[in-house]
Structures are given as C-alpha cells and as structure tokens.
Image: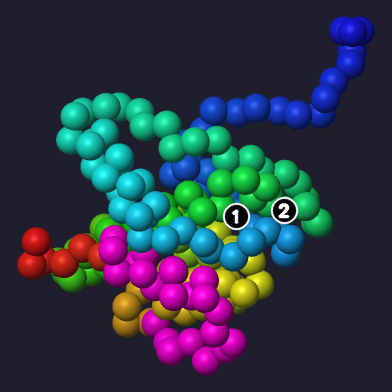
C-alpha cells in the first residue's frame, strides 16, 4: 500500500463527557429509536458504580462512532443507546443537585452536557439529538430541568416508555 493511501478514517480517544460537552451530536433518521430496557440501563449503572467505588480512573464505555452528516454536523453512527443513557444519568444528577438547592452545580451539568443555552435565540439546544421519534419527547421530559418540563403531546412510541423507565431507574432522590 502506498504511503499516501488513506481510508479517510480518523480515530480519537475521547470520553463520553468530552464528546457531549464539545460537540452537538445527532442521531440520523435511519437509526433506531431508544431501545434499552431496564436490564441494560441497570447493568451500565452498576458497572459505572463499581468502577467509581473501586477508584478506577477510566471506565471504557465502548466505542462511539461519529460521522459528518449534512451541514458537517456530527452524527452518531454507533453508540446512541450509551450516549442517551449517559445523558439520562447526567440529567438525574442535575435534578438531584436541584433537589439539594445547588442551582450552580445543576446549571453547570446542564450547560456542559445536556442543553446549550443560546442567548440570541433565548432557547436551549440539546447536546444530543435523538431520532425523529424520540427527540421531542427526550427534550421535553428528560433533558429539560423539572421546572421547565412539559407534557409531551406528540405521537407516543414504545421507545418513550423505555426512555421513561431509564429515567426512573436512574433518578436520585434525597431519600437515599
């Protein structure tokens, strides 16, 4: 193979938090809806908890494959279930901080990993856009902080129940 031959593929080691904080990621139309059931969510949470409690500095969540889509936007070719579940987990931490009256901490998690506030538009843009079936539901019922959440009035899909189940499993309360 010639030295100048290239596959056009670039690999970069980056954590999920870094990917969510530094890029807006979109799940393309052809990707499936959220599909993780409670067992997968609980397994991920348990694995992360064990890694954290044992003092592991790094936990390999798995590869996430991003491509450049229309308008050079970053699209998730693989890893959307892990990204969505991680976002739900971060939203649960944000909600817990709000419950503890730590608005500054909650705002930091929200602006860094969940919703990027655009001052000109006076609106927030999600860091992770799920597919067309799940996106509006995900934003309205999970990504927005509890005080800003609205009832979802669009078409209901089975994946919405799975997203809700994941959010309920990952919810943190001061009763713990």
User: In the image shown, does 54 or 18 lie closer to the viewer?
Assistant: 54
In the rendered image, the vertical position of residue 41 relative to residue 157, given as above or below: above
Q: Residue 127 location, x and y as percent?
A: 53, 59
Viewer can see residue 104: no
Residue on which disc 1 sits: 24
> In the figure, is residue 77 to the left or right of 46?
right
Question: Of marks 1 and 2, which one's residue comes earlier in the chain?
Answer: 1
Residue on which disc 2 sits: 73
Q: Answer few, some or many: residues within 10 Å of disc 2's Cα (few below 14, many 20 plus, some between 14 and 19).
A: some
Check if residue 163 falls in the magenta segment.
yes
Q: Are marks 1 and 2 in contact (CB under 8 Å)?
A: yes
For the N terminus, the quadrant is top right
Q: Residue 138 location, x and y as percent?
A: 49, 72
Q: Residue 52 location, x and y as percent?
A: 23, 36
Q: Secondary structure at mark 2?
A: loop
In the rendered image, the vertical position of residue 94 relative to residue 50, given as above or below: below
> In the figure, is residue 21 to the left or right of 10?
left
The residue positioned 62% from the left and 74% from the top of the image is 133
Q: Which residues are magenta?
A: 149-170
Using the rendered view, name the quadrant where residue 129 is placed: bottom right
Q: Secondary structure at mark 1?
A: loop
Using the rendered view, name the quadrant where residue 143 is placed: bottom left
């Amino acid at each position: 193979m010639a030295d100048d031959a290239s596959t056009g593929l670039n690999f970069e080691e980056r954590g999920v938090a870094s990917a969510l904080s530094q890029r807006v990621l979109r799940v393309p139309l052809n990707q499936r809806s959220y599909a993780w059931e409670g067992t997968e969510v609980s397994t991920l949470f348990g694995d992360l908890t064990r890694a954290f409690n044992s003092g592991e500095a790094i936990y390999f969540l798995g590869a996430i494959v991003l491509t450049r889509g229309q308008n050079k936007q970053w699209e998730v070719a693989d890893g959307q279930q892990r990204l969505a579940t991680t976002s739900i987990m971060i939203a649960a931490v944000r909600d817990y901080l709000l419950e503890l009256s730590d608005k500054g901490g909650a705002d930091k998690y929200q602006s860094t990993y969940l919703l990027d506030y655009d001052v000109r538009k006076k609106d927030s843009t999600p860091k992770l856009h799920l597919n067309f079936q799940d996106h509006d539901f995900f934003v309205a019922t999970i990504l927005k902080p509890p005080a800003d959440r609205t009832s979802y009035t669009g078409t209901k899909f089975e994946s919405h129940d799975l997203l809700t189940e994941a959010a309920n499993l990952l919810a943190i309360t001061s009763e713990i």
